[in-house]
Amino acid sequence: MQALDTQTTIAVIGAGAMGSGIAQVAAQAGHRVYLHDQRDGAATAGRDGIAKQLQRRVDKGKMEQQAVDAIVSRIHPVNALSEVADSRMVIEAIIEDLEIKHSLLTDLEELCSKDTILATNTSSISVTALGAKLRHPERLVGMHFFNPAPLMALVEVVKGLATDNAIAEIVHATAANWGKKPVFATSTPGFIVNRVARPFYAESLRLLQEGAADPATLDAIIREAGNFRMGPFELTDLIGHDVNYAVTNSVFKAYYQDARFLPSLIQKELVEAGRLGRKSGQGFYSYTDGSERPAP
Ligand code: NAI
């Protein structure tokens, strides 16, 4: 199946960590990209963040200024959702919440043409369930990137029960065209990566709760002895505790409260305190002065 032509327009809804990263990936591949967020100024801030990051590559001599300018000029922040109507594919990367995603997807179905592909970057919510409110659930497919999207190669292409195979194939080919390594997955809770990652986080949080060691020590041991690139606490600080906690809850619920997936009270507290990790300046570590150190 053919990848989407780079002359087509892609829309990304949600200009947070993932949406901005996905917009960058699509623009780098040559697409015109609409970036929309319901928070005032967030889409423009998302584009500015991309420009700043790419500028660092120019400063290091790793990219040409012209290439960066071209990529940034292809990203168009839009204030109204209706402005994305002529997109060939819309990728949603908003909050991990079934009802809010339902509402967005049904709005998109009203706005866009019947040929527009609807893709969701959900980390854990069933693509089948997300499609249940659509008149044409066959055009909804999971396109699950990893954080940070411009750097991480893997993309899970998730088929719900109703997803049209041909559309999943187009999304798979498009991800490959964007320089990614796509894999097909079914709509099982947490798909592949977030399913196998659950015990990694859960056991680490249990160790912490039992007082085995502090987060920095546990991260160092897992990095050095386990050869992981990041330990569980620095990784969940990067992902965002609101997102990671929502994913754990969603998998826990989907498996009928199986104790293996029990959410952690430590993480719940962090979310309630607004200590969401890097994005809020504090999580298990503090990032307020630009350095990473254990949170007080
Ligand atoms: P984030 O909190 O950084 O960004 C979410 C953005 O969506 C915010 O800017 C918010 O204002 C916006 N938003 C919320 N509701 C909206 C609506 N109805 N319409 C338009 N904009 C809306 O979250 P993040 O980390 O970017 O996650 C987004 C999605 O990507 C979630 O579904 C998450 O599970 C998934 N994901 C997250 C990963 C991570 O490591 N953080 C990795 C892979 C997927």
Image: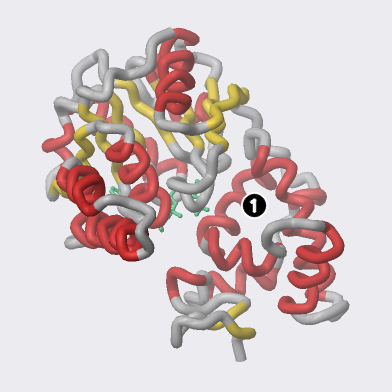
> Is the CB atom of the residue marked by disc 1 within 8 angstroms of ligand 1's nearest atom?
no
Q: Position of residue 78 (x, y in %)?
A: 14, 46
Q: Is residue 86 above or below residue 43?
A: above
Q: Residues within 10 Å of mark 1 (few under 14, many from 20)?
A: many
The residue nearer to you, when weighing 88 against 265, is 88
Q: Position of residue 167 (x, y in %)?
A: 42, 14
Is 147 positioned to the left or the right of 249 in the image?
left
Q: Is residue 144 above or below residue 285?
A: above
Residue that appears at 49% across and 33% down: 180
Q: Is residue 37 visible?
A: no
The residue tagged 1 is 248
Q: Position of residue 218 (x, y in %)?
A: 79, 72
Q: Is residue 47 above or below residue 86?
A: below
- Residue type marked 1: Thr
Is 254 positioned to the left or the right of 157 in the image?
right
> Extreme front residue here?
61
Please tell me whether mark 1 sits on a helix, a strand or a loop.
Answer: helix
Is 68 positioned to the left or the right of 128 in the image?
left
Q: Quadrant of the C terminus?
A: bottom right
Residue that appears at 19% across and 48% down: 66
Q: Is residue 269 above or below residue 27?
A: below
Q: Quadrant of the N terminus?
A: top left
Q: Is residue 73 visible?
A: yes
The residue nearer to you, when weighing 223 against 274, is 223
Give the image quarter of residue 211: bottom right
Residue that appears at 51% across and 79% down: 282
Residue that appears at 49% across and 48% down: 151
Count the labels in the image. 1
